Image (cartoon, helix red, strand yellow):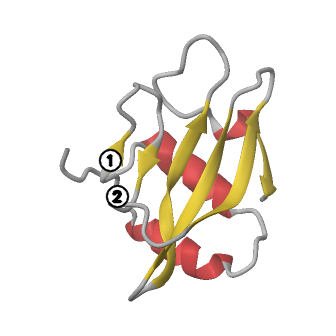
């Protein structure tokens, strides 16, 4: 898969996740403006990656639960040797029988700092 722009829903979810007040969030908000999708999950869930590979370390910055279900998602970052902490992607955490085709609408998310 090549790179592609974020869909409107992906962009809205990313912005909602980064609206939470977490430590050092400003550089991540700046990166979000330029974010592109470089990979998706092979299982068909709506997880998206903003970086290839997981770098040296992966950190969960924001958690979100989907109201009315046990599903959720996480915004993670990776440590890049040259650039420091960079947006890694949005990981879908599904426990229902089927995964949705796209990320849940931001209005349905209960978002909190990790």
Q: Characterize the local packing of mark 1: few (<14), some (14-19) or many (20 or more) Cα atoms within 10 angstroms.
A: some
Query: In the rendered image, which quarter is residue 52 located in?
Result: bottom left
Mark carried by residue 36: 2
In the image, farthest residue toward the top: 97
Indicate the position of residue 107 as horizontal and vertical percent values.
Answer: 72, 37
In the picture, residue 75 is in which quadrant? bottom right
- Which numbered dot is residue 64? none
Quadrant (top left/top right/bottom left/bottom right) for the N terminus:
top left
Which residue of the protein is positioned furthest toward the left in this rendering? 2
Q: Dot 2: what SS?
A: loop
- Residue 71, horizontal then vertical, whole percent: 70, 28
The residue at 45%/68% (across/down) is 33
Give the residue drawn at x 47%, y 39%. Answer: 47
Vertical position of residue 112 compared to residue 18: above or below: above
| Relative horizontal placement of residue 95, taking residue 46 as reference (left or right) | right
Residue in the image at 49% along x and 51% along y:
11
Label 1: element kind: strand
- Total numbered badges shown on the rendered structure: 2
Q: In which quadrant will I find the C terminus?
A: bottom right
Distance from disc 2 to disc 1, alpha carbons, whole Å, reads 9 Å
Left or right: 54 in relation to 52: right
Question: Which residue is most to the front?
Answer: 56
Numbered label attached to residue 39: 1
- Residue 51, image x, y percentages: 37, 62
Reply above or below: 19 against 49.
below
- Name the residue rendered at 50%, 67% in the picture: 87
Mark toward the viewer: 2 or 1 = 1
């Amino acid at each position: 898969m090549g790179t592609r722009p974020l869909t409107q829903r992906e962009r809205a979810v990313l912005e909602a996740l980064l609206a939470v007040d977490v430590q050092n969030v400003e550089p991540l908000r700046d990166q979000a403006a330029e974010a592109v999708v470089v990979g998706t999950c092979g299982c068909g869930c709506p997880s998206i990656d903003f970086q290839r590979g997981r770098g040296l370390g992966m950190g969960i910055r924001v958690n979100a639960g989907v109201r009315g279900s046990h599903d959720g998602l996480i915004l993670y970052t990776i440590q890049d040797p040259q650039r420091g902490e960079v947006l890694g992607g949005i990981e879908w955490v599904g426990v229902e029988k089927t995964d949705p085709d796209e990320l849940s609408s931001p209005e349905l998310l209960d978002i909190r700092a990790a």
